[in-house]
C-alpha cells in the first residue's frame, strides 16, 4: 500500500499519523510476500494497539475542540478498531494463529473507508467552520 494524496485530510499531525499507519501496512504486506511474517505481524499488532490509543485520542480531542458534528459515531468507529486490534494482539500472545491476510484486508479497508471518508469529514468541518 502506498500513501496517496486522496488520504490527506488537511490536518498535518493527523495526516502524519495516518502515513505511519500506511507505512506499517506496507511493511506487513512486504513481510507476507517474502514469507517472513511472524515477527512483523507481532510488531504491526503492537504498533496498531498503540496507534489506536494515541492517534484516536488526538483525533477525538480535535473533534471536541472544533465542535465536530458526528463525534459520537466517529468515536464508536474508533472503539471498534481498537477492540479488533487488541483482540488480535491478545490472540497472538496466547499462541493462537492470526491470519495476516485478513488483518491486511481489515487495515486496507480501514484506510480506504475510514480515513478517506470519515476522517476527511473532520478536515472539511475545520475548513467550513473556519477553525
Image (spheres, grey):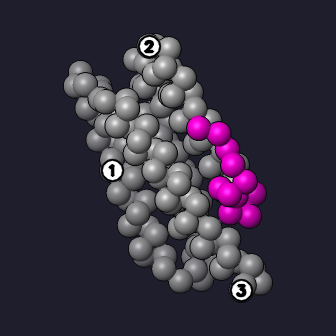
Mark 2 vs 1: CB contact within 8 A: no
Q: Please provide percent x and percent y for residue 81.
A: 39, 53
Please tell me whether mark 1 sits on a helix, a strand or a loop: helix
Judged left or right of residue 131, residue 71 is left
Which residue is under mark 2? 35
Which residue is under mark 1? 83
* One can see residue 97 in this view: yes
> In the figure, 94 relative to 11: above or below?
above
Region rendered in magenta = 1-13
Q: Is residue 12 magenta?
A: yes
Residue sitting at 40 percent across and 45 percent down?
Answer: 106
Q: Is residue 8 magenta?
A: yes
Which callout, 2 or 1, points at the residue further toward the start of the chain? 2
Q: Please provide percent x and percent y for residue 114.
A: 50, 60
Residue sitting at 65 percent across and 56 percent down?
Answer: 7
Which residue is under mark 3? 129
> In the figure, 104 relative to 18: above or below?
above
Which callout, 2 or 3, points at the residue further toward the start of the chain? 2
Judged left or right of residue 39, residue 17 is right
Position of the C terminus, as image quadrant, is: bottom right
Judged left or right of residue 27, residue 85 is left
Classify mark 3: residues with Cα within 10 Å, few (<14), some (14-19) or many (20+). Answer: few
Residue sitting at 25 percent across and 32 percent down?
Answer: 91
Amino acid at each position: 500500500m502506498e500513501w496517496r494524496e486522496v488520504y490527506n485530510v488537511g490536518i498535518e499531525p493527523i495526516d502524519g499519523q495516518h502515513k505511519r499507519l500506511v507505512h506499517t501496512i506496507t511493511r506487513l504486506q512486504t513481510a507476507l510476500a517474502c514469507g517472513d511474517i511472524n515477527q512483523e505481524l507481532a510488531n504491526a499488532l503492537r504498533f496498531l494497539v498503540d496507534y489506536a490509543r494515541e492517534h484516536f485520542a488526538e483525533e477525538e480531542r480535535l473533534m471536541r475542540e472544533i465542535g465536530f458534528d458526528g463525534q459520537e459515531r466517529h468515536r464508536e468507529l474508533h472503539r471498534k478498531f481498537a477492540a479488533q486490534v487488541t483482540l488480535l494482539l491478545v490472540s497472538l500472545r496466547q499462541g493462537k494463529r492470526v491470519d495476516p491476510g485478513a488483518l491486511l484486508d481489515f487495515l486496507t479497508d480501514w484506510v480506504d473507508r475510514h480515513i478517506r471518508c470519515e476522517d476527511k469529514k473532520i478536515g472539511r468541518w475545520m475548513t467550513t467552520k473556519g477553525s
